[in-house]
Image (cartoon, rainbow, N blue to C red):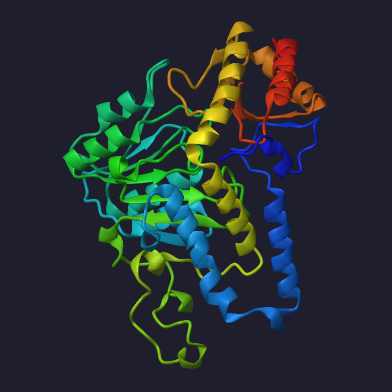
Amino acid sequence: MLPADPRALFEIPDEIAYFNCASIGPLPRASREAIEAGAARRAQPWHVTMQNWVDEHEERRALFAGIAGAPADAVALIPSVSYGVAVAARNLAAAPGQQVLLIAEDFPSDVYTWRAFAAEKGCGIVTVARAPGEPWTEAVLARLDARVAVVAVPNVQWTDGALLDLARIGARAREVGAALVVDASQSFGMMRFDLDAVRPDFLVGVGYKWLLGPYGLSYLYADEKYWDGAPLEENWLSRLGSEDFSSLVDYREEYRPGARRYDMGERSALELNGGGLASLRLMHDWGAAAIAERVGALTGRIEAEATRLGFAISSAPVRGPHLLGIELPREAARRAFSLLRERGVYVAFRGNAIRIAAHVYNNDADVDRLVEALAEIA
């Protein structure tokens, strides 16, 4: 359950309206304190225990799994989205003549991996664009046929939050025999994710944006049929029995159960793990439904005011509750950056559009500050 004033949990001054969580989220106070405690322990490493090495990160795995509605065995602890997408690419197949389906202007970490995959497999890439006003879902489904071996799409477009219906896309992917890889970095935790309906083969989520955690801690979900797959690296902690330091040179071929074989080296994250835990605990306690309700009300008000001022909404007709794209006239875009910063409003600029990325720490005063600035830009 959300507290009455979530902003009090963050170190954001009243005069700052921070609408750029899609770039990097602010650490909650509790997370910063946990990271500082981890750093203090590392400064005196004789205090580092077996629990710190082997056990503490399992709670972080379980918390992410709980938000996803998945078993903890299905989750790997990874450093980045690119790492997780690379794991997926290593464990999927495509033949010459088949295709990887991407959406236009997707995030580079996704695109580069699938370009390398296509070059290695000798398959093609089909990049789906959408017409103005066309939902992404319809554009993807129109191109998703038996030639497609892998569908690699987000839940929302990273530039403006335009929504993709993953349940419909997942159902169509299964019909044609394609694997589904979801980059949920710009939606996970902010929107309820129905794992049973979507049924992705792999899903990745970055920890430092909407999950409000430290940089360098991210997450990978792998469907059970991939639990005997090939990891990117062979690290000692991913092997069965690695908690027994006295027998580390009794080398084991067996991996720890489930998706743990895909864990990154140094997954214990001794300095950062506590911060990741603190942030995930908050997200878990708040719940995606309560987050979406609060944040959706704020972005809905922004959308209405921006429309009233004559701006077009690039994320129309359907978008996530937490992201919004506002198109600016070219002459307005030139002066918008400095004007917004002067007003203490932080957004992302994407060409002639601004991306509004709100979280629970935003409030009506932030919206007022943003709308007043938009009125000056219009």
User: Residue 25 or 193: which is nearer the viewer?
Assistant: 193
- Counting from the top left corner in percent of width and height, residue 272 is at 64, 62
Q: Is residue 32 left or right of residue 296?
A: right
> Looking at the picture, does residue 219 appear above or below residue 234?
above
Tell me which residue sits at (63%, 43%) in the image. 24
Q: Is residue 370 left or right of residue 156?
A: right
> On the image, which quarter does residue 270 sit in?
bottom right
Q: Is residue 54 left or right of residue 34?
A: left
- Count of labels in the image: 0
- Counting from the top left corner in percent of width and height, residue 77 is at 48, 62
User: Residue 304 or 346: which is nearer the viewer?
Assistant: 304
- Counting from the top left corner in percent of width and height, residue 149 is at 24, 45
User: Residue 333 or 367: which is nearer the viewer?
Assistant: 367
- Counting from the top left corner in percent of width and height, residue 155 is at 42, 36
Where's the C terminus, which quadrant?
top right
User: Residue 279 or 78: which is nearer the viewer?
Assistant: 279
Q: Is residue 180 left or right of residue 12?
A: left
Residue 100 at least partly seen: no
Tell me which residue sits at (52%, 72%) in the image. 55
Residue 284 at least partly seen: yes
> Looking at the picture, does residue 125 appear above or below residue 328?
below
Tell me which residue sits at (37%, 53%) in the image. 70
Where's the N terminus, which quadrant?
top right
Tell me which residue sits at (76%, 43%) in the image. 11
> Looking at the picture, does residue 161 appear above or below residue 24?
above
